[in-house]
Image (tube, grey):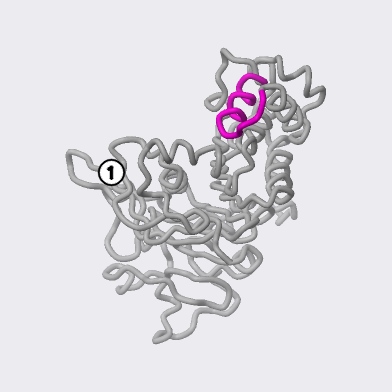
Amino acid sequence: MTATLSVRNLRVEIPTRQGVLTAIDDLSFDIAPGEVLGVVGESGAGKSITGAAIIGLLEPPGRVAGGEITLAGERIDNLPPAQIRRLRGKRIGMIFQDPLTSLDPLYRIGDQLIETILTHESISASAARDKAERLLEEVGIAAAGQRLAAYPHQFSGGMRQRVVIALALAADPALVIADEPTTALDVSVQAQIIALIKRLCRERGASVMLITHDMGVIAETADRVCVLYAGRLAELGAVRDVVKKPQHPYTAGLMAAIPSLIDDRGTRLAQIPGAMPRLEAIPEGCAFHPRCRYAFARCVAERPPLYKTVSSDAACFLHDPQRAAAPAGGIA
């Protein structure tokens, strides 16, 4: 089966006066039809830049300097700007963090939905209005026909994000990229929005790339997880396996930082020491080694490849077959 999205050896560079910085370094992953792939990591890991590279929205002077991106078997990273613009919205839908940046405050919600539909479909204005109303109903907005006449400021944050989801699904895309879709929302609304994205995409057969810093959201939502660190792939595997048996020390640290409803009698949450390195200061060898309690001499000198483990693919020398086996239960 052809993957909805295939990213191979992606490299994103940012030229500066001090030299060329590498934001994404040799990243590869696939998203199968109907699959939810969670892309997780701390701020600065390269999650949003990866999404921007896929849809051709890298901010200059950022550029795709290597690798290939294919959508349903068709290469898209080398398309002219006019073609990639037609692709956005039609075959790839985008849900951004802040709905206020996705909606024009001067235009009614209905006008924005209808314009998007008419841009990508050859239907009449009345048919487009009917579809816009159905979309609002699908995303859970009551009295959809009346709310088409409302402006963005007349909606709550959660309702605005529902409108943005409707916009992303307006042309029935094959892939939806959701970039931190709940960051600007109250905690009580976040679960509703994530569940809505997952349900609607499953019903429509769309694949989802869910970008987040929250491993808890990934554990509840995604089918597979792609863990990024300093623009590099740290671990990739099925969510249920990675959650139970994380094979990379960074993934284990993210899992340990998830709050639990079970009271551990004052036990403090675990934290990963240090911070994500700046692009101009990514260390040699394994980028995570300055923060890793398992690091040894080889980690400082060499960059680890991806190793097949009991539960995932992990870029960690602990899984080198020539070394004593890492714990089968994962890295604690």
Which percent across, then down, holds residue 67? 35, 58
Kindly tell me whether residue 82 is visible in this rendering. yes
| Rendered-image quadrant of the C terminus | bottom right
Amino acid tagged 1: Ile
* Residue displayed at 43% across by 76% down: 318
Q: Which residue is mark 1?
A: 14
Which percent across, then down, holds residue 113? 63, 26
Q: Determine which quarter of the picture holds residue 128.
A: top right
Q: Depth check: 286 or 171 in front?
A: 171
* Residue displayed at 82% across by 22% down: 143
Q: Determine which quarter of the picture holds residue 257.
A: bottom right
- Circle 1 — which element? strand
Kindly tell me whether residue 185 is visible in this rendering. no
Q: Depth check: 289 or 187 in front?
A: 187
Q: Relative to residue 139, is residue 304 drawn left or right?
A: left
Q: Is residue 240 above or below residue 149?
A: below
Q: Determine which quarter of the picture holds residue 26.
A: bottom left
- Of all residues shown, which one is farthest toward the top? 106
Magenta run includes residue 6: no
Q: How many marks?
A: 1
| Rendered-image quadrant of the N terminus | bottom right
Magenta-highlighted residues: 110-124
* Mark 1 nearby-residue class (10 Å; few <14, some 14–19, many ≥20): some
* Residue displayed at 49% across by 59% down: 73
Which percent across, then down, holds residue 310? 57, 78
Q: Is residue 131 above or below residue 15?
A: above
* Residue displayed at 81% across by 26% down: 142
Q: Look at the magenta stretch and give its main secondary structure.
A: helix
Q: Relative to residue 119, is residue 281 drawn left or right?
A: left
